Image (cartoon, rainbow, N blue to C red):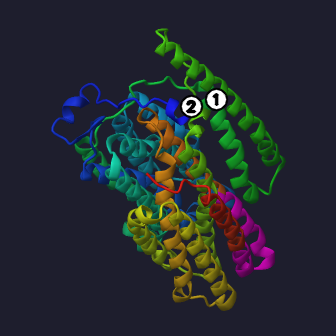
Amino acid sequence: MSETQIPTIRNRTAGPDAAKTTGRPRTSSGPALSPLGLFTVLLGAALPLIDFFIVNVALPTMDRDLHAGPAVLELVVAGYGVAYAVLLVLGGRLGDTFGRRRLFLAGMAAFGLTSLACGLAPDAWSLVGARVAQGASAALMLPQVLATIHSSTSGSRRARALSMYGATAGLSMVAGQILGGVLVAADIAGTGWRAVFLVNVPVALIGLLLSVRTVPETRSNRPAPVDLPGTVLLALSLITLMVPLTEGQAAGWPLWTWLTLGAFPILAAAFYVVERRADRADQAARSSAEGGGGRGAGQTPLLPPSMFALQGLRRGLPMVVPFSIGFGGFMFVIAVALQQGLRYGPVDAGLALAPMATTFFVASLMGPRLVGRYGSRVVTAGGLIQAVGIVLLMLAVWRDWPDLSLTGLLPGVALAGFGQGLQLPVLIRIVLADVPNERAGVGSGVMVTTQQSALALGVATLGTLFLALAPSAGMANALIITLVAQLGAIALTLLLSLRLPRTVS
């Protein structure tokens, strides 16, 4: 299906929520997102991303307190990431069907409750279970953010909102580790590592109160039923890829990890075949409906392959993968290297990344103006700047280890953060630029699933490489080799950036 053949259907305000949006600004397709509403949904976007990274600096304390061991600690990270990634596309589909504001509220409430369960977990396995539930609740909430922005803004307001989303996403990933270090070191009321989860509870309550008043209800005019075969196959594909990669190193690569990895390409191929067949049936049903015939139920795929006919999604989404693999792997590896290699405390380990957070945010704010002048070449420039930052960091490690100070880290992490800030917000705009409003939930689900899966893969692949090399090569050499691998991912993003559409809408 070509880009022009995918119909754009107006979003509508539904049921009793229609009255609640009276008096708000409106776009041509429904209620507009106010500045306070944008702040509220961005708060919902920040929470899941912060929580993916906030545990990195808390893991040593959890290990001492719960006697967890490395394999279970990996599950604390992986359980959240896998549940989150597996259910994101389904969360976007449910928002299209039942209302994005409604799913956002449900996800926010569930996120607060599961965060409380994490903070009160009596043992390691209870924490793992609570983290899986927390990841599932995040998957309900996060897809509604991009879908709401996409369906309740337009023109320059949408461009600014997507830039703010990109800034929030990148800043949250860095700030998560900074905040985690501060909370663990503060040991508020003796809570120790538990504070990294308990802090979410009041934030979720504030988000719920704001959401009721400020977030408009939108949904698709053609709500599609859940694609059960596609959902199951996507879940199994992601599980068979991410669980063995994440757990393999800690478990010693037993037979089950290799068997599970071997099942991944088979399940992924089955998912593609099922979705392509459903997509063709869906297009046939659309043609029949336009000709006066009926439309069959259960034919709309979870992830329509025809969406990849959209130029922005087809060219932008492949860039998100190496970018996020490098980002996720770097954040995990640097946390381990600083705490275990340089013996930094949790606060210093977090503060080492403060320059990255600052420059990322500055670059994100500069992005819209630069994109208006230079188009997608801003992404290419950002990749080059990020690469220079990683090289400076490698030189600092080679020259000063084990006496590497925060000052020595500053130039490398600052430049890397600035380069990342020029890339991520623009990539998000490009990926979602051509997605029709009726598929805003599916498009945002695809975007965040790709991003989240790649972040988890970065932790699994670059993290595994670093942990495998450290005992024999030494921490400094393991870090340098891992940074070289990240440079390879950056080189790939640079090559792919040359294929991006020059003009960014």
Secondary structure category for the residue under label 1: helix
Q: Are marks 1 and 2 in contact (CB under 8 Å)?
A: yes
The label shown at residue 146 is none
Question: Which residue is at the front of the view, 232 or 158?
Answer: 158
Q: In the shown orientation, is residue 482 left or right of residue 132?
A: right
Please say whether residue 357 is visible from this viewpoint: yes
Give the dominant element type of the magenta stretch: helix, strand or loop.
helix
Question: Which residue is at the front of the view, 222 or 250?
Answer: 222
**Magenta segment: does it hold 473?**
yes
Quadrant assignment, res 412: bottom right
The amino acid type of the residue labelled 1 equals Glu
Q: Identify the residue position indicated by label 2 in the image.
A: 302
**Magenta segment: does it hold 462?**
yes
Secondary structure category for the residue under label 2: loop
Please say whether residue 201 is visible from this viewpoint: no
Q: How far from the left and from the top, in percent, is residue 284? A: 58, 18
Quadrant assignment, res 460: bottom right
The amino acid type of the residue labelled 2 equals Leu
Against 483, residue 124 (above or below) is above
Q: Which residues are magenta?
A: 458-481
Identified at 61% across, 60% down, the residue is: 498
The label shown at residue 275 is 1
Nearest to N terminus: mark 1 or mark 2: 1
View extreme (left): residue: 23
Against 24, residue 504 (above or below) is below
Identified at 24% across, 45% down, the residue is: 214
Identified at 69% across, 48% down, the residue is: 243
View extreme (top): residue: 293
Q: Quadrant of the N terminus?
A: top right
